[in-house]
Image: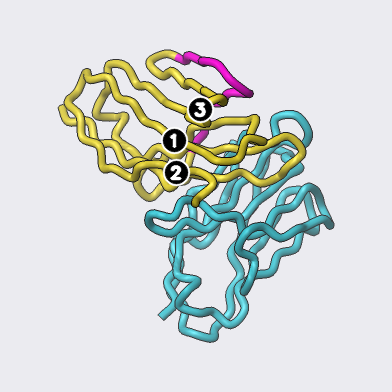
Chain colours: A cyan, B yellow
Amino acid sequence: NAGVTQTPKFRILKIGQSMTLQCTQDMNHNYMYWYRQDPGMGLKLIYYSVGAGITDKGEVPNGYNVSRSTTEDFPLRLELAAPSQTSVYFCASSYGGEGWEKLFFGSGTQLSVL
Amino acid sequence: QKEVEQDPGPLSVPEGAIVSLNCTYSNSAFQYFMWYRQYSRKGPELLMYTYSSGNKEDGRFTAQVDKSSKYISLFIRDSQPSDSATYLCAMSYTGGFKTIFGAGTRLFVKA
């Protein structure tokens, strides 16, 4: 049972480049989330999804896009990368309904934009 | 003022010590209170979960919630070097899909 799988683990981008961070879960969770973690700042919610075809913005959505075409996958797209997007990105999932607040995290993607 | 405040530490204790980790919050609507443990270069993992006020115990770990003071605590008894990690408090409210995290407290347990 893999849980939440994120790829790649590390990536260096040049300013202005684009990339997609992949996230897949095999727990049949309805809810999925993208967070970024910066030193001393805790985890900030970028986007979340409560089911296939449904996404919504979190606290820090600017510069990112998401899609949710299947229950399992929730990719995060960075367009025109900027140094401010240097961070560690975590994908998470949870059950829908009761228990939604118990999050299961992937191992993260460390992204540097230079 | 941040919604959730957590002392970043680091906190260094000898093996076997009792550890107390704390968070304060400002939003009285929070109903769910969690503690996540995060090892270096890993994702957070849920350690303790409490709904509303009260205490919850799981092995060496005890979580306490005092809603009147807007204060939550995590106690670790008989701390072990394997407990060395960053501990994140987290909170959310009924009907919301957004969890608010503290900045995390880095804990070192020395053998």
- How packed mark 1 is, by other alpha carbons closer than 10 Å (few <14, some 14-19, many 20 or more), is many
Kindly state the secondary structure of the residue where label 3 is placed: loop
- Tag 1 and tag 3 share a subunit: yes
Residue at (61, 43) in percent of width and height: B99
Q: Label 3 to label 2, Cα distance in Å? A: 13 Å
- Tag 2 and tag 1 share a subunit: yes
Instruction: Using the image, determine if residue B37 lies above or below residue B100.
Output: above
> In the rendered structure, are the residues bearing label 2 and label 1 in contact, judged by CB atoms less than 8 Å apart?
yes
Q: Label 1 to label 3, Cα distance in Å? A: 11 Å
Q: Chain of mark 1?
A: B
Residue at (70, 30) in percent of width and height: A99
Q: Which residue is mark 1?
A: B23
Q: Which residue is mark 3?
A: B69
Q: Is residue B56 magenta?
A: yes
Residue A4: image quadrant is: top right
- Name the kind of residue labelled 1 in the image: Cys
- Name the kind of residue labelled 2 in the image: Glu
Kindly state the secondary structure of the residue where label 1 is placed: strand
Q: Chain of mark 2?
A: B
Q: Nearer the viewer, residue A67 or B93?
A: B93
Give the mark toward the camera: 1 or 3. Answer: 3
In percent of width and height, residue B71 lies at 48, 30
Which numbered disc flags the more N-terminal residue, 1 or 3?
1
The magenta stretch is: B45-58
Residue A27: image quadrant is: top right
In percent of width and height, residue A35 lies at 57, 55
Marking on residue B5: 2
In percent of width and height, residue A3 lies at 59, 40
Residue B13: image quadrant is: top left
- How packed mark 2 is, by other alpha carbons closer than 10 Å (few <14, some 14-19, many 20 or more), is some
